[in-house]
Image: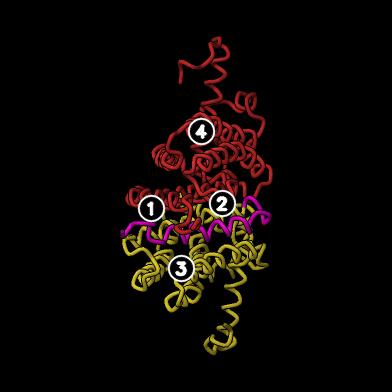
Chain colours: A red, B yellow
Amino acid sequence: MNDMSPVIGPRARRQQDQRRRILDAAVTCFAQGGFHATGMQAICAEAGMSPGALYRYFPSKEAIIEAIVERDRAEAPAMLAPLLEADDVVGALVQAGRDFLTGNLQTGGMPIFIELCAEAARNPQVNAITQRCEGEIHDLLVRVIQRGQTLGQVDPALDAAAAVRLLSSLADGLLLRMGLEGIAGVDDLLVMFERAVRSFLAAPAGALR
Amino acid sequence: MNDMSPVIGPRARRQQDQRRRILDAAVTCFAQGGFHATGMQAICAEAGMSPGALYRYFPSKEAIIEAIVERDRAEAPAMLAPLLEADDVVGALVQAGRDFLTGNLQTGGMPIFIELCAEAARNPQVNAITQRCEGEIHDLLVRVIQRGQTLGQVDPALDAAAAVRLLSSLADGLLLRMGLEGIAGVDDLLVMFERAVRSFLAAPAGALR
């Protein structure tokens, strides 16, 4: 990925590094203490920066959380784009779901995911941020499902948009559970995840008879 | 339900009422400000009680959250027991899932559900409480699935315990999404939920040929 980055000067690179440092510190703080209970002061301490320096990059906690969500979201289209060219659409969807789940478990992404959800339930501004970012991923996945329908791999009677909301809910619910139960039972759940996705997307037996 | 309550004296009834008042106040506070950021003082204010009175019932926030989880859990076996006698096991499971989702949406149970998850991700004590309470519901649902297998309504090759974890994850993920997206798209999601549960539990087409 680094090879693909545009060439930037040392000043811009330093700004990028500083932003990354603040966001990483904020993720650590939010995961430990919750978004609501974490002050800008704690983020400064974790990042090893003065408040003055931090406020130059982010004027508020909402701005930080927006940047965290945005950073996660920015990676999604690149991860999901190959789905639009896969020969086996359903198999590729299952693999993308597995990667999403195991990736988040390995990087410890679960606590910040759940913390974001909790804050979104309380704070309309954060809810709007997460909905907007999720919208792009949703639209891409709808196109994937529709392509599967065109190729005869997904039940053509399925409402693609509603199906994506179901599958996204399933992935979120599994991430939540895996995070809380720990890594032990993950393999079983991934097998079940594949069964659920394949059976859900297939045309019901006898449906077309 | 009130007719089933054991006869109790006025003193015990008053204690029950006080406990309920504290728990209702705590649910309101946790949903608004988060478990982590909410102090005992705020719960006292919401309940209209002195700290001395409140501490007689609950020595800590953890004790309050345990009682909240316990209260929710106490209702589950009565709600789920009919599943063990249903003629149509899968239909009854779908209906129980619908009731769980719409019930939580109507009572505003979502914010406290997500708040509990967020706290469980941070606080091993709260995680242990939620896992223990969830264990009873899990065991009951495993028996329901196994009964469906005995009756020939659920794929006999399915691992019942893993299947319950998948279905519970799906229900949690849907509750999360419905809570954050609002009530507008709930009907579509409930239709998808039914399709997902039925297709997941059915023997795959051609599996036994």
- Would you place residue A202 above or below residue B83 in this image? above
**Do the residues indicated by labels 4 and 2 lie within the same chain of the protein?**
yes
User: Which one is closest to the eye, mark 2 or mark 1?
Assistant: 2
Q: Amino acid at mark 1?
A: Met
Q: Is residue B164 magenta?
A: no
Residue beneath disc 1: A192
Q: Which residues are magenta?
A: B180-209
Q: Residues within 10 Å of mark 2 (few under 14, many from 20)?
A: few
Q: Amino acid at mark 3?
A: Val
Classify the position of the N terminus of chain A by image quarter.
top left
Residue A35 visible in this rendered orientation of the protein: yes
Residue beneath disc 3: B90
Query: Quick check: marks 1 and 3 in contact, CB under 8 Å?
Result: no
Q: Residues within 10 Å of mark 4 (few under 14, many from 20)?
A: some
User: Main SS type for the magenta part?
Assistant: helix
Q: Secondary structure at mark 2?
A: loop
Residue beneath disc 2: A157
Q: Amino acid at mark 4?
A: Leu
User: Which of B182/B67 is in front?
Assistant: B182
Q: Amino acid at mark 2?
A: Ala
Question: Alpha-carbon distance for marks 4 and 1?
Answer: 24 Å
